[in-house]
């Protein structure tokens, strides 16, 4: 384990605590780091390890059935007594049932992902005392959802792995953070070091969302071949999928390029053809594409088929250097964040002298 140099700097630690206080209080954790929800990866073992480290683990519902989610939530509670959340894709055909599982099992935070959450979902969760987190692609959307009762937001830049948007994290932060001060906002996309955490906190973020950095954690159930692919990858290897038809919106996916990337073109073309022929409506066709990614990702993560399976990865994959325990990763990130703040203080002190 690398030496922890800056964690003994009391002034830097105090500043880090102050900057992250809002996020830590909202999540109920020691460190304002939200685990990015990664299908097949963000299950009980990784989620519990994340929460036990002092960060905030999040279960990825993905294509899980309500009963599968119930077992995953119960399994996570068996491994940790610390707070964790559940990420639910709003286009899931059993959305209401998934939300009820979260309510029944006492989940404190739910992340509504995959589009603009319906008001009914937000109201249902809040009526049960659940804190609601949503993604905010623009400031206008964030303000609208805030009026509907959403408690906190994640702004995720195009550097993120998996489904992502068209705008860089740094640009989103400049567009949104200065104007959205009344609710906690967590920043995600391309974050692999604590230096970035410190900078986003200074810009007004409540904390950061990190996914790719945890893929090669010791507690991650990812296949050994999947982890090796990450350890050998560079930032430029994590590429965005291409949309074939501008009239048929498909959320871009960032992954390491392989045969599955080519197979996605075929799956997308076939789904569009079935939509054009009237065999499927647009939502059904989009679900077909989503299921392609879910199945493809499982082949890579669980089965180790890194040629035909999807290797969803953020551009921070180049900063994943070795396999290490979650607690060590979190401590490393916090040390780097404190170091950045300490160096800033030193610079100001030297400059003023």
Image (spheres, rainbow, N blue to C red):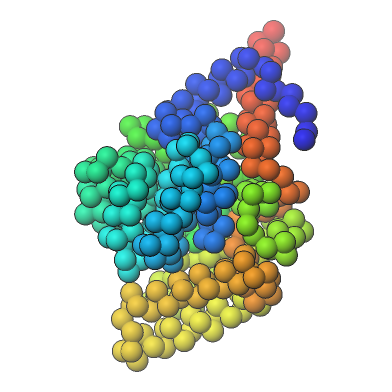
Q: Is residue 113 visible to the viewer in this orientation of the structure?
A: no
In the image, is residue 209 above or below residue 229? above
- Would residue 179 appear left or right of 54 to someone viewing this image? left
Q: Measuring 55% from the left and 20% from the top, which residue is drawn there?
A: 15
Quarter of the figure that contains the C terminus: top right
In the image, is residue 300 above or below residue 267? above
Q: Measuring 39% from the left and 56% from the top, which residue is drawn there?
A: 70
- Would residue 198 appear left or right of 29 to someone viewing this image? right
- Would residue 140 appear left or right of 73 to someone viewing this image? left
Q: How many marks?
A: 0
Residue in the foreground of this view, choosing between 212 and 73: 73
Find residue 285 and report its horizontal and vertical position in percent.
38, 79
In the image, is residue 159 above or below residue 337? below
Q: Is residue 107 visible to the viewer in this orientation of the structure?
A: yes
- Would residue 100 appear left or right of 224 to someone viewing this image? left
Residue in the foreground of this view, choosing between 44 and 306: 44
Q: Measuring 71% from the left and 13% from the top, which residue is drawn there?
A: 350
Find residue 195 and report its horizontal and vertical position in percent.
64, 34
Residue found at the very far bottom of the displayed protein: 277
Q: Measuring 43% from the left and 45% from the top, which residue is drawn there?
A: 85
Q: Residue 239 sits in which quadrant? A: bottom right
Quarter of the figure that contains the N terminus: top right
């Amino acid at each position: 384990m690398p030496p922890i140099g800056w964690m003994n700097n009391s002034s830097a630690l105090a500043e880090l605590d102050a900057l992250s206080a809002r996020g830590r209080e909202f999540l109920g954790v020691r460190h304002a780091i939200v685990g990015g929800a990664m299908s097949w990866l963000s299950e009980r073992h990784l989620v519990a390890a994340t929460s036990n480290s002092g960060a905030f683990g999040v279960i990825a519902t993905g294509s899980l059935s309500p009963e599968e989610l119930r077992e995953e939530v119960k399994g996570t509670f068996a491994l940790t007594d610390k707070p964790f959340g559940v990420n639910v894709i709003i286009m899931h055909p059993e959305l209401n049932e998934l939300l009820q599982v979260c309510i029944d099992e006492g989940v404190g935070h739910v992340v509504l992902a995959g589009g603009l959450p319906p008001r009914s979902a937000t109201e249902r969760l809040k009526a049960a005392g659940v804190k609601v987190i949503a993604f905010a692609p623009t400031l206008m959307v964030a303000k609208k959802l805030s009026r509907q009762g959403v408690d906190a937001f994640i702004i995720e830049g195009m550097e993120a792995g998996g489904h992502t948007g068209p705008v860089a994290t740094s640009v989103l932060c400049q567009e949104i953070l200065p104007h959205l001060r009344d609710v906690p906002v967590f920043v995600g996309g391309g974050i692999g070091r604590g230096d970035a955490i410190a900078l986003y906190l200074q810009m007004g973020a409540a904390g950061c969302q990190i996914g790719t950095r945890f893929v090669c954690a010791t507690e991650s159930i990812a296949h050994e071949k999947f982890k090796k692919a990450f350890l050998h990858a560079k930032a430029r290897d994590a590429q965005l999928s291409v949309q074939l038809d501008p009239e048929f919106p498909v959320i871009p996916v960032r992954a390491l390029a392989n045969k599955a990337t080519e197979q996605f073109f075929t799956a997308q073309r076939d789904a569009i053809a079935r939509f054009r022929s009237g065999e499927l409506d647009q939502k059904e066709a989009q679900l077909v594409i989503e299921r392609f990614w879910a199945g493809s990702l499982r082949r890579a993560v669980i089965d180790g088929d890194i040629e035909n399976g999807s290797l969803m990865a953020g551009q921070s994959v180049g900063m994943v250097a070795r396999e290490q325990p979650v607690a060590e990763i979190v401590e490393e990130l916090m040390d780097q964040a404190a170091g950045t703040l300490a160096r800033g203080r030193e610079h100001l002190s030297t400059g003023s002298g």
